[in-house]
Amino acid sequence: VVEEHIYDRVEQQMSGLTRGFLAPIFFVSVGFHLDFTSIAAVPGFVVILTLLALASKLIGSGVPALWAGFSRRESLLVGVGMSGRGAVELIIAGVALEAGLFMQPDPPGAIVESLFSAIVIMAIVTTVATPIALRLLWRR
């Protein structure tokens, strides 16, 4: 079909522009707003947020995989594999930041002040931990 060929050509050209130029600019702009002192300000919150993110992705994708007939090991691999989708969190956090959803209340609270950075740190940790965990699980 001619339309399918045109779509594939346009998609290929646009994905090069998006992945090679626009995506790096977006991730750098998110990084400019990152404040690593939030780890020191609310370390427990950052750890709990990261653990909840991992657990929710394990449950949210691992359990349906189990229901679909995958073995427990395969379901665990699916759940762990989905934990590395940190780009989605960064996009949502970036949109929320631009919309002003991270504006501090009066008086500001430590968690609210650190929320954006905590989300970015959680996304980085889950993205980096996923291939390591998959490699360890795949060896078993």
Image: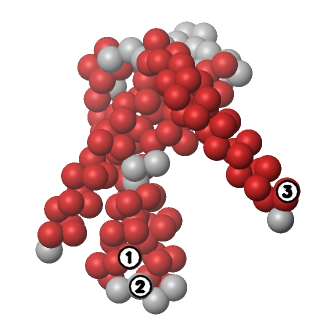
Instruction: Tell us which disc is closer to us: 3 or 1.
Output: 3
Whole-angstrom CA distance, mark 3 to mark 1, is 38 Å
Q: Answer whether labels 2 and 3 touch (C-beta < 8 Å).
A: no
- Residue ID at (14%, 74%): 140
Q: Earlier in the sequence, mark 3 or mark 1?
A: 3
Q: Say which element carries label 1.
A: helix
The residue wearing badge 2 is: 70
Sequence-first disc among 2 and 3: 3
Residue corresponding to mark 3: 3
Is 64 placed left or right of 71 in the picture?
Answer: right
Bin the neighbour count of mark 2 within 10 Å (Cα to Cα): few under 14, some 14-19, many 20 and up.
Answer: some
Asked whether residue 49 appears in the rendered view, the answer is yes
Q: Find numbered disc 3 in the image and state the secondary structure of the residue it sits on.
A: helix
Residue 75 is marked as 1
Amino acid found under the numbered disc labelled 2:
Phe
User: Which of these two is toward me, 27 or 110?
Assistant: 27
x%, y% of residue 130?
31, 52
Q: Is mark 3 in CB contact (under 8 Å) with mark 1? A: no
Q: CA distance from mark 2 to mark 3?
A: 37 Å
Residue 116 - label: none
Task: Pick the quarter of the image with the N terminus.
Answer: bottom right
The residue sitting at 34% across, 78% down in the picture is 74
Based on the displayed image, in which of its 4 quarters is residue 34 positioned? top left
Q: Amino acid at mark 3?
A: Glu
Q: Residue furthest bottom?
A: 69
In the rendering, at what x and y percent does residue 133 appear?
23, 57
Residue 52 percent location from the top left of the image: 40, 50
Q: Amino acid at mark 1?
A: Ser
Q: Earlier in the sequence, mark 2 or mark 1?
A: 2
